[in-house]
Image (cartoon, rainbow, N blue to C red):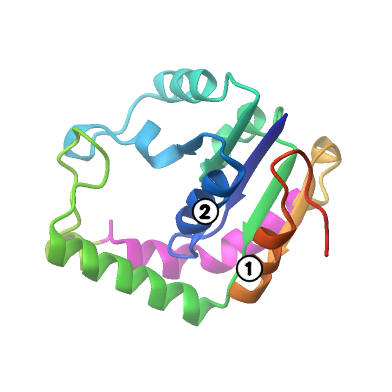
Amino acid sequence: MMRINVIGTSGSGKSTLSKRLASQLDIPYIEMDQLFWGPNWQMPRDEAFYSRLELALDQDYWVLDGNYTRTTPIKWSQTQLVIWVDYSFTRTLLQALKRATVRIATRKELWPNTGNRETLRKLFSKDSIIWWTVSNFRKNRRKYVTMMYDSRYAHIRFVRLRSPADAERLLSDLRPEGDYCPG
């Protein structure tokens, strides 16, 4: 079994890393945002969201991309490895801005059959990914450090990536047949 949760502030690069991990390990990739967001940016009730998450996690192997702190008891009861993408504030903010700009320019639908797209209006609103990154970056750092040392999660191996070079080393050290093997 291999169950990995990749976490990090919006714009940190967790989706990119999660997809690469899942591909390299040849295991399912699960995106929490896709489980959460409905058409027209509708948010589900927690019960519906939790049910979708539990169903998606009902397999022996996966890479789960996402935070949603309220789901921690569900997802981390099965998680063996948490990878925290913790790049600098400047890098994370620039990545979030670049991603939003590309999505606006391409009008890319974010999750199938939702019609949800980034827009200029959304980019400059209180719901903006940029605003979310700015207002949550430091809070998330404090929260994740605390969670790493919480005895409820002693069964989980935590890896904190501080740079893209750290991510590349992790990718080269992960093996499909098992565990994270530090190089």
Determine whether the residue tagged by mark 2 lies in a helix, strand or loop. Answer: helix
The amino acid on which the numbered mark 1 sits, given as a three-letter code, is Glu
Which residue is drawn at the image coordinates 23% and 67% (left, top)?
102
Q: Position of residue 33 (x, y in %)?
A: 39, 41
Query: For residue 146: magenta?
Result: yes
Task: Using the numbered discs, state the Cα–Cα distance from disc 1 to disc 2 in whole angstroms.
Answer: 10 Å
Along the line of sight, which residue is nearer the eye, 163 or 66? 163
**From what the image shows, is residue 87 above or below residue 76?**
below
Q: Position of residue 46 (x, y in %)?
A: 44, 25
Q: Position of residue 150 (x, y in %)?
A: 81, 45
**From what the image shows, is residue 65 above or below residue 108?**
above
Q: Position of residue 82 (x, y in %)?
A: 69, 47
For residue 20, the mark is 2
Residue 101 as seen in the image, left or right of residue 139: left
Which residue is drawn at the image coordinates 70% and 67% (left, top)?
169
Along the line of sight, which residue is nearer the eye, 100 or 48? 100
Residue at mark 1: 168
**From what the image shows, is residue 129 above or below residue 2?**
below
Which residue is drawn at the image coordinates 57% and 78% (left, top)?
88
Quadrant showing the C terminus: bottom right
- Whether residue 163 appears in this view of the structure is no
The amino acid on which the numbered mark 2 sits, given as a three-letter code, is Arg
Residue span colored magenta: 126-147
Query: For residue 133: magenta?
Result: yes
- Whether residue 29 appears in this view of the structure is yes
